[in-house]
Image (cartoon, helix red, strand yellow):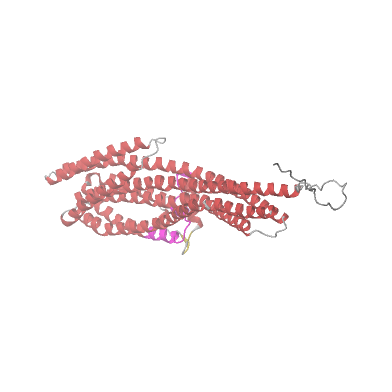
Amino acid sequence: MATIAKKTSPGPTTGNPAAPPPQQAVVAPARSNPRVDRLRSWMLAVVAAAISFGLLAGLIAWQANLATYNNYHKIVDVGSVSVDSALRARAAVLDHMSAAATFLETTGDNQKAAETRATQRWADFNNEARISWRNLSDTTYGEYAVYAAADAAASDYIQQIGAMFSYYGAGEVDKAGTAFLAARETLNTRLVPALGGLEAVKVEAMETTYAGAAQVITNWQYVLLGAAALLALILVAGLLAIRFMHYRWSWPVGIALIVSLVLALVMAVQLGQARSDAQVMVRQAYDNVAGVQDMEALLSQGRALESIAIFDPAQSASHLDSFDQYISLVEQRLCGPVDCSKSTFLQTASSISAQVRDLAVDEKNRLGLPRLPLVANVSFPGQAAAYEKFRSDYQTWLASHATLAQQVKAGQLDAASQTSTGESAQAFGTAVASADAAGAIARSEYDKIWQGVYATTGINQVLWLVFPLMGLVAAFGVWQRRSELFA
C-alpha cells in the first residue's frame, strides 16, 4: 500500500516578511597611485641603466688601458728593441774591426787577446742581428730591404776578415793588411750605413707611434670620463628616487657611486700620466740612450783607426785625419761645436751650464741635427755629473791618442803599438765605461716609465670588472627599495 509523504512547512521567519533576501556587498577595485607608478617605473629604468652603463663603463675602461698598453708596446717592444739591436750590432761590428786591426799591429799575448775579442764581438753582432731579424715588422718604411742590405754586407765583410786571418796565418802579412782594408771599406760604405738605415726606419716608426699615442690616450681618457659621468648620473638618479620614498640613503647605491667615481678618476689620472710619460720616455730618456750608443760607435771607429795607422804607416796621415773627423762627430753628438769638450760642462755639481746648453742647441739648429746634443737634453738626476765624468775621461784618452799620433808621425811604430795596447787602450776603456754609466741613467728612467705603464694598464685591464659589478650592486639596492615600495 502506497504511503503519502507529508509536506513540511518552512520554519517561522524573522524580520520583515516582505524584505528582499540579503545580497553580498560588491567591493570596488583599488585605484592605483600615479605617483607610485611613476616612481616604480623610474626605479626600474634606473636598475636597467645601472647594469647597462656599468658594463659600458667597464668595457671602455678595458679598451682605454688596452690601447695605452698597445701604444707603449709598439714603442718599447717593437721600436726601441730594434733600434737597440741595430745600435748594439753596429757597436759590436766596429769593435770587431778594431780588434782585427789590433791583431795586425801586435804580436804575442796582445795579438791572441785581440783575436779572442774579435771572435766574441762577432758573436755579439750575430746575436743582435738575429734580434733585429725577429723583430722585422715595418714594410711601410722599407725595413726588410734595409735588413737584406745589412745581411749581404755583413756576409761580405766577414769573408774579407776571414781572408785576412788566413793570409796572416800563411805569413802573407801584406795581403792580410790589404784584405783588412777591403773589409773596412765594406764596413764603412755598406754595413754601417745599412745598420744606420735599420735604426732610422725603426726610429721613424717609433716617432709615428709616439705622435699618435698621445692623441689616442687622450681620446680614451675623455671617453672613459664621459662614461663614468653617465654612470654616476644614473646612480644619483637612483638615490633621488630612493629619497622620494622618504629614505635618506641606500648603502649599495652609495657605495657603487663612490667606487665607480674614484676608480674612473684614478684610471683617468693614470692615462694622463701615461700620455705625458710617453714624451719623456721617447724624447728625453730614449734619445739619451740612443745618443750614447751612437757616440760609443763613433769612439770605436776612432779607436780602430789608431791601430790601422800603426800597421798601415804608408797611409797613416789619412788614417789620423779620419780619426779627427770621427772625434768631431763625437763632440757634435756630445756637446755640439768642435772642441766643446775641452772645458767643463757644469754650472754646479749637478747641473749643466746654461752657456754650454745654449751652444749645443745652436749647433743642433745650425746643422739640422736630428737630435739634441746630449748635454742639452739633461733631464734626470745624476746625468750632468755623468756627462762631466765622461768628458774628463774622454779628454784623457785624447791625450793618449796625441802621444800615439806623434809616435806614428815620427816613425816610432813599436812605441806607438805599446801606447795603443797600453795607455790608450786603458784610457779608451775608461771613457767607454763612463759613457755606459751616463747612458744607464737614461735607460733606468726609460725602463721605469714603460714598466710602470705596463703594470698599471695590466692591473686596470682586470679592474674594469669593478664597473659592471658596481652597476649590479646599485641595481640591487634600487630594486630592493622598489620592492619595499610595492609592499
Could you tell me if residue 338 is visible in this image? Answer: no
Is 232 in front, or is 293? 232
Quadrant for the C terminus, please: bottom right
What residue do we see at 43% from left, 52% from top?
Answer: 288
Q: Position of residue 396 (x, y in %)?
A: 33, 59
In the rendered structure, which segment of residues is drawn in magenta? Answer: 366-392
What residue do we see at 40% from left, 49% from top?
Answer: 290
Q: Does the magenta-highlighted stretch encompass residue 337?
A: no
Is 327 in front, or is 294? 294
Q: Position of residue 181 (x, y in %)?
A: 23, 42
Extreme-bottom residue of the structure? 349
Side of 345 where 428 appears, left or right: left
Q: Position of residue 363 (x, y in %)?
A: 47, 47
Side of 22 where 238 appears, left or right: left
Side of 173 where 264 appears, left or right: right
Is 394 in front, or is 30? 30
Q: Position of residue 4 (x, y in %)?
A: 74, 43
Is 265 in front, or is 273? 265
Could you tell me if residue 316 is visible in this image? Answer: yes
Quadrant for the N terminus, please: top right
Q: How many badges with numbers are in the image?
A: 0
Q: Does the magenta-highlighted stretch encompass residue 383?
A: yes
Extreme-left residue of the structure? 170
